[in-house]
Amino acid sequence: MPIEGKLTADEMVFKLKADFLKSLAHPARLAIIEYLKKGEAAVGQMATDLGIEQSGLSKHLAILRLTGILSPRQEKANVYYSIKDRNIFSVLRPIAEILKRRLEESEILLSRLGRE
């Protein structure tokens, strides 16, 4: 980072990307995104179904909302969340594929160890 504390355009882009990826870097937030894949849900129902205390869930929802991943909708006393941009699944899918390949490679190595 420059001494003056100002970011260059490239550094700002990297920071924005890093902040976005950090918003995904929690198991509960990934579970929320996966849960909402099937459609909109009320906060209370999500808390029950995901087994997350409502206060903690609210913090995770706020992070995902601030990064533009989720969209809230209020109806009377209930707040509902949905996926704002379904392209998030295009980001998560390759990660799942990479992890799947790593697991398969590990299984191959483990099976070889078992033969020795």
Image (cartoon, rainbow, N blue to C red):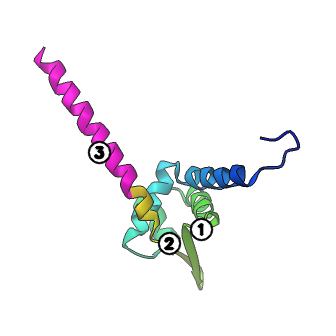
The residue that disc 2 covers is: 85
Measured in 3D between alpha carbons, the distance from the residue under mark 2 to the one under mark 1, in whole angstroms, is 8 Å
Looking at the picture, how far across and down is residue 2, in whole percent? 82, 41
Tag 3's secondary structure? helix
Near-viewer residue (97 or 75): 97
Is the Cβ of the residue at disc 2 closer than 8 Å to that at disc 1? yes
Q: Earlier in the sequence, mark 2 or mark 3?
A: 2
Looking at the picture, how far across and down is residue 22, in whole percent? 58, 50
Write down the quadrant of residue 69 in the picture: bottom right
Determine whether, in the image, residue 43 is placed left or right of residue 10. left
* Circle 1: residue type: Gly
The residue that disc 3 covers is: 100
Measured in 3D between alpha carbons, the distance from the residue under mark 2 to the one under mark 3, in whole angstroms, is 25 Å
Q: Earlier in the sequence, mark 2 or mark 1?
A: 1
Looking at the picture, how far across and down is residue 9, in whole percent? 73, 55
Determine whether, in the image, residue 110 is placed left or right of residue 84. left
Q: Is residue 85 above or below residue 27?
A: below
Q: Is residue 103 above or below residue 45?
A: above
Q: Residues within 10 Å of mark 2 (few under 14, many from 20)?
A: few
**Range of residues picked out in magenta:** 93-116
Q: Residue furthest left?
A: 115
Is the Cβ of the residue at disc 2 closer than 8 Å to that at disc 3? no
* Circle 3: residue type: Lys
Q: Does residue 3 belong to the magenta stretch?
A: no
Task: In the rendered structure, find residue 68 and report the number of the disc placed on it.
Answer: 1
Point 39% across, 69% down: residue: 37
Q: Residues within 10 Å of mark 1 (few under 14, many from 20)?
A: some
Q: Residue furthest right?
A: 4
- Which is the main secondary structure of the residues drawn in magenta? helix
